Amino acid sequence: MSLDQDLQDRLRRVLTSLEMLLPKPVERMDWARCHAANWRRHSFGGHLEPVSTVEGIQLSDLLGIEEQKRVVEQNTRQFLAGYPANNVLLWGTRGTGKSSLVRALLRAHADEGLRIIQVDKDDLVSLPAIVDELRGERYRFILFSDDVSFEVGESSYKMLKSALDGSVYAPPENVVIYVTSNRRHLVPEFETDNLGVMRVNNEIHQGEALEEKISLSGRFGLWVGFHAFSQDEYVAVARQWVARLTEKAGATPEWTREAEDAAVAWSHKKGDRSGRIAYQFATHWVGERLLRSRG
């Protein structure tokens, strides 16, 4: 083999290897047809990936959180109208409808120009690249990060903090940020955090460690809390779901003391009372009885 041929073969192998590392070409997003996207980060940046189907949940399907729905939808409607609107932190107990509420907003308001981009917590470092792609678009975008929690000092923590603080990374006027978390301040809180609390002129002043921890959550204009249901609230939501699922199957809804006792037992077994648990019970209860009625 000649020297030239050997060099060509080596170059070919190098180019083949590089081609495998590079991301595939991505077409520009057609927001008129696509209502949601995921941000996919890679070694050389990232790109928006269209989401072909979005969860078909509606605002009316979210039971037991009427006030939370009202507050978040009001803020979203302000945003869609081009009026001042806040970034939103939806925090609280798992399974209470935080992320489902954000997805239901898309179903309710997509025709008005609302679009959603889901960004994983670790990909929040790409916020500057994401918002650069959205500047000048005629649609209104919610950057949505689900189930977020941080350790103080993480790069994603710092980038989100900068974006919310109105720095050079701040989103344009057609973008807001909605985040869900089980933690009110998005970071773990420890008993030792309170050791730095001081009393000055009879006023309580937080210690530096605690101040740093709440400095991120404090940058969200709206805090919307989601809490576990009482037993009565849980049973009421379970009953509503049983009725809806039964009617959807073309049967006549029926709620008995047996069903109520079974719903309570289901929540005890799960160790939780929430909209998710109520829906799971209703799915099991209705499906089992419909199958039995056929057999």
Image: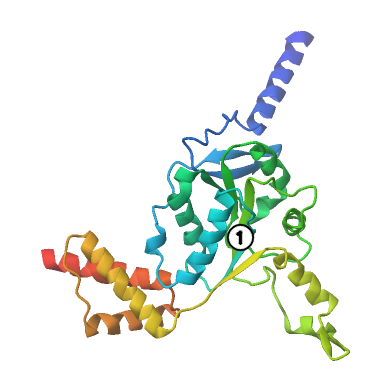
- Extreme-left residue of the structure: 295
Work out which residue is located at the far right of the displayed protein and give it. 201
| Residue drawn at point x = 51 percent, y = 57 percent | 102
Residue found 23% across the figure and 60% down from its top: 248
**Observer-nearest residue: 191 or 29?**
29
Q: Position of residue 270 (x, y in %)?
A: 42, 77
Q: Is residue 35 above or below residue 156?
A: above
Residue 182 falls in image quadrant? bottom right
Camera-nearest residue between 263 and 83: 83
Up-down relation of residue 218 to residue 112 (above or below): below
Residue 266 visible in image = no
Q: Nearer the viewer, residue 105 or 194?
A: 105
Q: Amino acid at mark 1?
A: Val
Residue at 67% from the left image edge and 54% from the top image edge: 122
Task: Identify the residue at horizontal 16%, vertical 64% (top origin).
Answer: 251
**Secondary element type, mark 1:** strand
- 68 horizontally vs 232: left or right: right
**Image x and y of residue 129, in percent:** 70, 41
Q: Position of residue 219 (x, y in %)?
A: 72, 63
* Location of mark 1 (residue): 179
Residue 46 shown left or right of residue 113 in the figure:
right
Is residue 209 at least partly visible in the picture?
A: yes
Q: Quadrant of the C terminus?
A: bottom left
